[in-house]
Amino acid sequence: MNNLKLAWRNLWRNRRRTLITSASIFFAVFFALFMRSLQLGSYDHMYKNAIESYTGYIQVQHKDFWEEKIVDNTFPYDRQLEQRILADANVTATIPRFESFALASNGPQTKGVMVMGVDPEKEEHLSKVTDKMVKYKLSAASIELIKQDSNLPEKIKELAPLFENSTYTTASRLQLDLGISDKDAGQWMPAIEQYSRFDNGHIEMGEPGVWVGEKLSSYLKLGIGDTIVLISQGYHATTAAGKYEIKGIVKLPLPDIDNKIVYLPLDICQGLYNAEGNLTSLALAVKDNKDRAIAGTVERIGGLVSGEKRVMEWREMNDVMVSQMDADDKGGQIMLGILYLVIAFGIFGTVLMLTAERKREFGVLVAIGMQKKKLSSVITLEMLLIGMLGLLAGVIVATILILYGVNHPLIFKGEMALMFEEYGMEPQFAFWTIDIYYISQILIVLAMVLLAIVYPLRKIFTMKVVNALRA
Amino acid sequence: MKILEIKNVHKIYNSSEVKVHAVNGVSLDFEKGEFAAIVGPSGSGKTTLLNMIGGLDTPSDGEIIVDQTNLAGLKSSALIDFRMRNIGFVFQSYNLIPVLTAKENVEFIMSLQKWNKKERDDRTFELLKAVGLEDRINSRPSKLSGGQQQRVAVARALASKPKFVLADEPTANLDSKSTETLLDIMEQLNKEEGITFIFSTHDARVVKKARRVITLEDGKVISDERKN
Ligand SMILES: Nc1ncnc2c1ncn2[C@@H]1O[C@H](COP(=O)(O)OP(=O)(O)OP(=O)(O)O)[C@@H](O)[C@H]1O
Ligand SMILES: [Mg+2]
């Protein structure tokens, strides 16, 4: 009769208790892993969105620009410096920008907006604005076309009006809203894509014209071909004002930026603010975006720029988001802590009952010749088996769901999507794949089980056989 | 041949304010092959004495020598080992490990001693046959009657060929039929195989079967009679 066999038999002498204990461990492990994956995935997603559609990982700025984002805190676009920065091994491209604020209006509608003077070609290295342009729109006209198409099923015709005026940057998102499965996509989507196609024009250096955020455009009731008026203060307190034709609509994943962004060609923007040749920032595209590589790059670029300028990394530039995520992270950890505490009590309760129940049996075993060490290893094995059962099941189920989630991010639509957007979030659940957070969760559970084992082991080693037999 | 010597053993419990002299200067010798009953009123010290003989409890004074080994000289884990090899135990009830079958219960000490499977199987079958349970070898204790459980306990106590078997009121929870069966089996093992039994009891029918009757009162031996 080896220890494992005895432990295994013991496991099933109170089947229900074993299952409840294992189930609670399963639940804790599953929930912890799933939640961590979701948290880490969504942070990563938010950061990527912020970095890739806006700040980039590293920027060179005028030293005062971050504190006071005024046109006076700009610096001349220095091509020689740009070349030296480009020579850095981790820098793949430099993206010059002129960023400021303005009042935008269309008739009676007015709104404070963020003006981004960009080189559209260079932006392709970082923010890839063209990927984020609205490509499809379910306008009243396109819905009418869908309804008239006798080849399309009724289901789609019924759904389409619910999404009137919705815009899409990808066909797959449009497909999702219309409830079309991947299987049917080949059959229905070409026609629908054709009816709802949304054509944007380009903005080019030297040519007046703007791209505006989709939310901003609907707030100001502006469409392609309409004119937007921008008013602001220029360099050295000059007046800045201009009228521009809207060439395209972009839909940025960050709703808070989408509702105020106006892209202008860089030189036109500099002209608007009477700051020809100046930049507010030179964003850098990098090869390796890991924290260590970024820190190294920041340090090297810091050595290249003169006293008037400074180098900032994405964490500083997205400080509000970073601290929000940190707070959320802490909240999540506290929740897990409470969960684990509850589970720990459950495990301890089981151990307590088990020890009390078997007091006499322990006495008999030691009386007839079982060494306390051997008895202890049987009980340890038994508790480890209970723990492992829950742990393994939790890890397996969580891993299956997490891996599925990583490959099929959960995208919300309709009302749910709006709710997310109201909180400034992209309506999507992103998952983080299997990573070191697994280890910490597994270690916590193992530590709880091992800690719980201390109690029966202590009882066994301090047990007086005569007293145990009297029980 | 003396297999057990009890020399002026005392046990004093000091737990509460009252001092209880549970065993008060007992001296006894046992020879191989005895079939001895320890009797006496409740509280006379039978259990306390048996526990000390079995090395489960330590005397406050005096010595217990089992086959030339003084139990006081053994450290706790050596004492556990000594018990396993030299002393068989049958307790009043709940003797058996509930998750093991009759066979596995009997085998238990043998596997602790790493006997090989063939030896174990042979001995287990022989013992279970001796207690009349060869047809119940694969039953768990919960599927056996109280009397059958005690018979398995006797078989287990004999597993490692101990010097003697201690049984504290082995029949206390049994009906008269089972009591008789158990006693007959013990008597037979004693007569045919020369196994030494020392048991305590309240039951007059059990006392009748004993060939030596030791009577305790207030922790002292007041009589020690041998029959035939
Ligand atoms: N752990 C203990 N602490 C204090 N006193 C004890 C302890 N164990 C036994 N006693 C006392 O020692 C005395 C002898 O008890 P013991 O159990 O040996 O008697 P017994 O002859 O076996 O009685 P019974 O026939 O009822 O089983 C009793 O007075 C009992 O109360
Ligand atoms: Mg007693």
Image (cartoon, grey):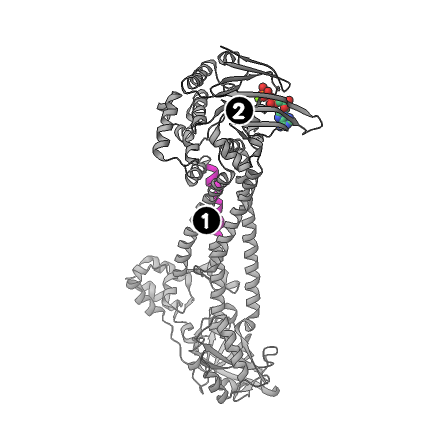
Mark 2 surroundings within 10 Å by alpha-carbon count, few (fewer than 14), some (14 through 19), many (20 or more): many
Q: Position of residue B74 (x, y in %)?
A: 55, 35
Q: Which residue is mark 2?
A: B4
Q: What main secondary structure does the magenta stretch of the protein show? A: helix
Q: Is residue A105 visible?
A: no
Between marks 1 and 2, how big is the CA–CA gap?
53 Å
Q: Quadrant of residue A359?
A: top right
Q: Position of residue A446 (x, y in %)?
A: 50, 50
> Badges 1 and 2: C-beta atoms under 8 Å apart?
no
What is the count of numbered marks?
Answer: 2
Element carrying mark 1: helix
Stretch of the chain drawn in magenta: A16-31
Left or right: residue A201 compared with residue B7 = left
Q: Which mark is residue A391?
A: 1
Decide: is B214 above or below A145: above
Q: Position of residue A402 (x, y in %)?
A: 42, 56
Element carrying mark 2: strand
